[in-house]
Image: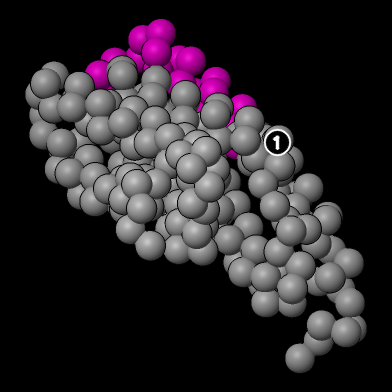
Amino acid sequence: MWNLPNVLTAFRILLVPLFVIFFYIDSSVARWITLGIFCFAAATDWLDGFLARRMNIESPFGAFLDPVADKLMVAITLILLVEREGSLLLAIPAMVIIGREITISALREWMAEVGNRAVVGVSVIGKLKTLSQMFAIFLFLLAPPSVFGLPKTFGFVFIWLSALLTLWSMFSYLKAAWPYLTSSENDA
């Protein structure tokens, strides 16, 4: 259970409180540390999956913990950024992204219960959504608060792109699961 990929995943979860603390410290050094923590977490997200596949040590615990770590870091970061920016232009895509994560997590749980988890496996659109979302968050963290410069402008572009990809991927997952959701065989 405590192999290297799972340790990296658990470490990402432990970084969340540290990320929040540095996010609220008002200094340029703290902003760089916050950005570094986020980048480290994003890199280890890729690394733990790569190592698990490469070392052939994928585990049910890792499969459970990895999306938890990802969703915690992204949701908490988006909430913090919405608070800092105080902008509807960021709040709307953040609500879409967080709402989709809750919806698809519930859908995957239900599909696993009925033995059809693979129907809502990770798609290419989901991966593009994640990449765009991480880049947008990176740009927002890079930009100093209350300065509307180039990083933040591109941050808004990429967060809206992420929201659109989020909706697209959510509808793709729901479409794939629709026959199971509407089947009378699955009624309780």
The correct choice, above or below, for 129 with respect to 112 in the image is: above
Q: Is residue 87 visible?
A: no
Tell me the chief SS of the magenta region: helix
Where residue 133 sits: x, y (%)? 51, 32
Q: Who is closer to the viewer here, 98 or 131?
A: 131
Residue shown at 84%/70% (left/top)?
A: 180
Quadrant of the drawing holding the C terminus: bottom right
Residue shown at 83%/56% (left/top)?
A: 176
Instruction: Identify the amino acid type marked 1.
Output: Ile
Q: Is residue 179 visible?
A: yes
Residue shown at 13%/27% (left/top)?
A: 30
**Bounds of the magenta segment:** 144-163
Farthest residue, direction front: 55
- Give the quadrant of residue 81: top left
| Mark 1 residue crowding within 10 angstroms, few (<14) / some (14–19) / many (20+) | some
Residue shown at 47%/24% (left/top)?
A: 135
Where residue 52 sits: x, y (%)? 48, 45
The reply to whether the magenta stretch includes residue 155 is yes
Quadrant of the drawing holding the N terminus: bottom left
Where residue 90 sits: x, y (%)? 46, 34
Q: Who is closer to the viewer here, 39 or 5?
A: 5
- Whether residue 36 sits left or right of residue 97 in the image: it is left
The correct choice, above or below, for 44 with respect to 115 in the image is: above
Which residue is label 1 attached to?
125
Q: Who is closer to the viewer here, 119 or 20?
A: 119
- Give the quadrant of residue 158: top right
The reply to whether the magenta stretch includes residue 148 is yes
Farthest residue, direction top: 150
